[in-house]
Amino acid sequence: MPVQAIPGFQLQPSAEQVALSTNYITNFNFLDQYLPDTYEKEFERYGNRTISSFLRMVGAEMPSNSDLITWAEQGRLHTKYVNCTSGAAAAANTATITINDALVPGTGTIALRVGQTIMVTGIAGAPTNNKALITGVGVAAGLLATQINVAYYEAGGQAAAVGVQTEIFVYGSEFAKGTNGMVGSLEADDIFFNNKPIILKDNYTVNGSDMAQIGWVEVSTENGATGYLWYLKSEHETRLRFDDYLETSMIEAVPAGVGSGAAAAGLTGSDGIFFVVENRGNVWSGGNPTVLADWDTVIARLDNQGSIEENVVFLDRNFGFDIDDMLAAQNSYGAGGTSWGLFDNDEEMALNLGFTGFRRGYDFYKTDWKYLNDPTMRGGIATGAGSGRVNGLLVPAGSTTIYDQVLGKNAKRPFLHVRYRASQTEDRRYKTWITGSAGGAATSDLDAMEVNFLSERAVCTMGANNFFIFEE
């Protein structure tokens, strides 16, 4: 078969030195005159895009071999009831006091005994106080299970009027000479909490043909991986994204409510850090604490809790600036100018307008939390009451003592730590495996490489009463 004349081929070059479509080859577009100048490296315009690091800074990870993680936290050492009423009139020398606290155990018993001395404080109207001796408790004294008989020490008798709400707390005991000892004993008041791990999954898939294509731009990711293969960048970014989700799931997870769609789908959810602190911790709402009086309110609440000496506040940018401005205002020159410092008064030095922390009753250290600043995560939530925006989280430093059911003894644990499912044969802390028939895998006839990621974990927020969450 002869070679056909059409289409033909061109041998004659152009007589003039100009770029024409017949003599200038471009990047597969024969109508362009000039080749583009290309940078061979991808520009990282968003910097480090990952947001995980919070739990690595404040907590730890340890294995668990159960679907349910349970721990016990210590209750209060001393006995106090805050919703009590007296059936006696003012000036009475004796009275029957009824304990109305919701904290009274379901058995109907109260942790008060004959011979104990108590302080009775009126909290309605004009404040009043009495000291009294418990002379009878519950059914043994012919009373209701939540009632006590008392005898006042003051000659003027009961200071509060009948039916006024009072608080009582035990401060000691007193017995007459030659009498028997204290009747009854008190058991330790442990409070039990639990959490359930959730399963997180992700995957990345690339077909074998695309794996054979090499790009011309060098790509890189935050974990230091570089190369000219685009699918490697996508795989690395999937891994980084999964790493971030391992942390943000522990922060944001909520339990599936009874009757919810998630519960109907067979999911249980989990108690994330924000959920636990909002329900069992301390909540500051209505903007940031911007003056010392605001922080005094925070400190007063911490005094009523565990009184942890050192605390770290993980916060967003605006909250950090608010604290900087508050601390700068304490300088005597803060209103009229800027103080350069006492020992290095150099007009050319760079002025540091930020603070790393302060001490007022407790040590408070502050650090920016990227998760709260990232516009694709919490940082993108609008400000305003009810918006759900979190401006900061106060986390106590150190560890707390809890009863570990796996170990069968008391153990020290960080206030925040992650428990992941693991046994001698299966470790689900961070699983990754490759399936398919490309990229070195030979597990199926699928002409692709599938990179799978899996983890099963839960976060334990110990001593949530010592945490503070700052919300709009």
Image (cartoon, rainbow, N blue to C red):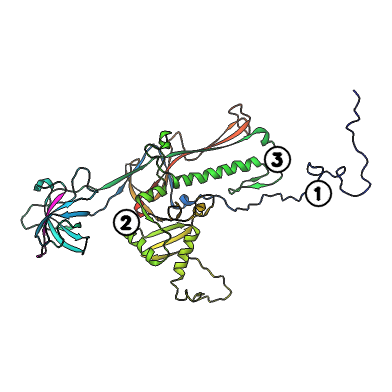
**Mark 2 or mark 1, earlier in chain:** 1
Work out how far the residue at label 2 is from the one at label 3, CA to CA, in angstroms.
60 Å
Q: Is residue 147 magenta?
A: yes
Q: Residue under label 1, please give it.
A: 34
Q: Is residue 195 magenta?
A: no
Which amino acid type is marked by label 2? Gln
* Residue at figure coordinates x 47%, y 74% from the top left: 335
Task: Identify the residue at the far left of this view.
Answer: 178
Which amino acid type is marked by label 3? Ile
What range is drawn magenta here? 146-157
Q: Tell me if mark 3 has few (under 14), some (14-19) or many (20+) residues whose alpha carbon lies within 10 angstroms of its own.
A: few
Q: Tell me if mark 2 has few (under 14), some (14-19) or many (20+) residues whose alpha carbon lies within 10 angstroms of its own.
A: some
User: Is the residue under label 3 in contact with that under label 2 (CB below 8 Å)?
Assistant: no
Residue 408 can be seen in this image: yes
Mark 1, secondary structure of its residue: loop
Q: Is residue 46 left or right of residue 114?
A: right
Disc nearest the viewer among 2 and 1 = 1
Q: Residue under label 2, please give it.
A: 305
Which amino acid type is marked by label 1? Tyr
Mark 3, secondary structure of its residue: loop
Mark 2, secondary structure of its residue: loop
Q: Tell me if mark 1 has few (under 14), some (14-19) or many (20+) residues whose alpha carbon lies within 10 angstroms of its own.
A: few
Q: Image quadrant of residue 435?
A: top right
Q: Is residue 103 left or right of residue 193?
A: left
**Mark 1 or mark 3, earlier in chain:** 1
Residue 356 can be seen in this image: no
Q: Quadrant of the N terminus?
A: top right
Q: Residue under label 3, please give it.
A: 214
Work out how far the residue at label 1 is from the one at label 3, CA to CA, in angstroms.
23 Å
* Residue at figure coordinates x 10%, y 62% from the top left: 91
Q: Nearer the viewer, residue 445 or 378?
A: 378
Q: Residue 101 shows which numbered tag? A: none
